[in-house]
Image (tube, grey):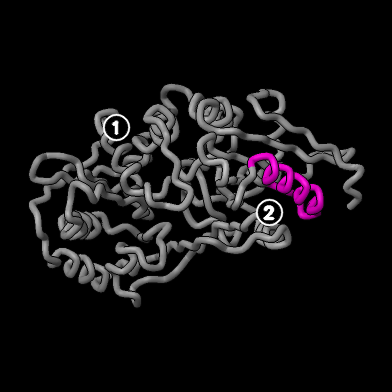
Amino acid sequence: MNNDDLIVLETDKWDKEFFKDFSDFRNSLYENESIFEKESIQSLSKVFNSDEVKNNYFFSAFLIKNERETIARIAFFTHKEKFHYLTFGYFESLPITPTVKLEQLISKMENKYKSTRITGPVNASIFLSYRIKSSEEKSFHSEPTYKNYYHDIFKELGFGVFKEWSSYKIDNSKKTFKDFKNIQKKNQQEKLTVKFLLPWRWDNYIEKIYFLFLKSYDKMEGFQFISLEFFKSHYDDFKYFLNPFFSYLVFNSEKKPVGFCINYFDPSHILNDYKEDLGFFEKIILRARLLLNTKRLLLVYVGKDSSLTKGKGFQSVISPYLKFFVFFFRPKEAFICFQEKKSRSKRSFDQQNQTEVSRYYLYSKKVKN
């Protein structure tokens, strides 16, 4: 590919026309995918045109084109208080990749912000989207969708695997119930109580969950503080997905929220039936279908504020509820999602009861000064 013939369009502020082309390119790449969440100009505006990004980040978004079409896109972000940490995200490319041009853009951003490391894919914040799946096959809702050949592109650009996660299908049988029972028996060193997360009261919970999210992930590589409003704008849809029988807030003896567990049934097969804007009655039908959905259970988010709890017995107090409702609803499949190898949730289940279904990577490289 002759890189001299390529056109690079760049913006460092919200430009509706630019970002329409930005989203159209991604949507055209995946239009034939059976499970694909379309990227809208509204979803991009919630990031690139948000007060959160305007006030706290520098960003540059690029479209790379030849004389006929867009062939790649990428965006770079760096926090205004942490120049050394540069991330790239929103990456998409045709198989014929403009590698030299991408190298030039990466070098330009590294020099501009004097970064010591560049990591990705991270779409602005780890609270939005980060990591890339090892294979293109989609297993369930909320998995990042990328092309298989992106791994080769990242490696060609000098990136190596920096972090790794996996999702596991757990054996929905008596063996798993025995695991739940063993978790329940673990020593609980403090009095903890559990409350169900009711979808219709989501607005009452979201601030508590927000603070617990911050406390749970503040030691994670690439963590940046985000505002409550930004969190709400991206997590409010959970009220349509979460199942009240499998999602909980945990309180200590002082009635302070110390942990959360958010799980839901995979809505992918339902959402695929609704591609356009919905009318009033269609929304009612959709919400009813989501509420009655019991096909594939996803155990997704769990976290706690270690400063308010000793951490002992956190899982044991949740386990009886999970055990009972798994037995009651009998989902056809159940998955533990996005787990590090040494995560407590993964280790709670017998290894023989787990089958890895997906693996995810975060890529990174040190900048040569």
Q: Residue furthest bottom?
A: 352
Q: Is residue 216 above or below residue 313?
A: above
Which residue corresponds to the image point at 66% horizontal and 46% vertical from the top-left? Answer: 91
Between disc 2 and disc 1, the foreground one is 2
Asked if residue 326 can be seen in this view, the reply is yes
Which residue corresponds to the image point at 25% horizontal and 42% vertical from the top-left? Answer: 244
Q: Find disc 2 in the rendering and name its residue.
A: 369
- For the residues labelled 2 and 1, the Cα–Cα distance comes to 42 Å
Q: What element carries label 1?
A: helix
Q: Is residue 121 left or right of residue 318?
A: right
Q: Which of 37 and 232 is in front in this view?
A: 232
Q: In this view, does 152 lie above or below 34?
A: below
Q: Is residue 185 left or right of residue 29?
A: left
* Magenta stretch, overall SS: helix
Which residue corresponds to the image point at 37% horizontal and 41% vertical from the top-left? Answer: 241
Q: Is residue 181 left or right of residue 359?
A: left
Asked if residue 319 can be seen in this view, the reply is no
The tag earlier along the polypeptide, 2 or 1, is 1
Q: Find disc 1 in the rendering and name its residue.
A: 207
Q: What element carries label 2?
A: loop
Of the residues shown, which amino acid type is indicated by label 2? Answer: Asn
Q: Which residues lie in the magenta part?
A: 92-113
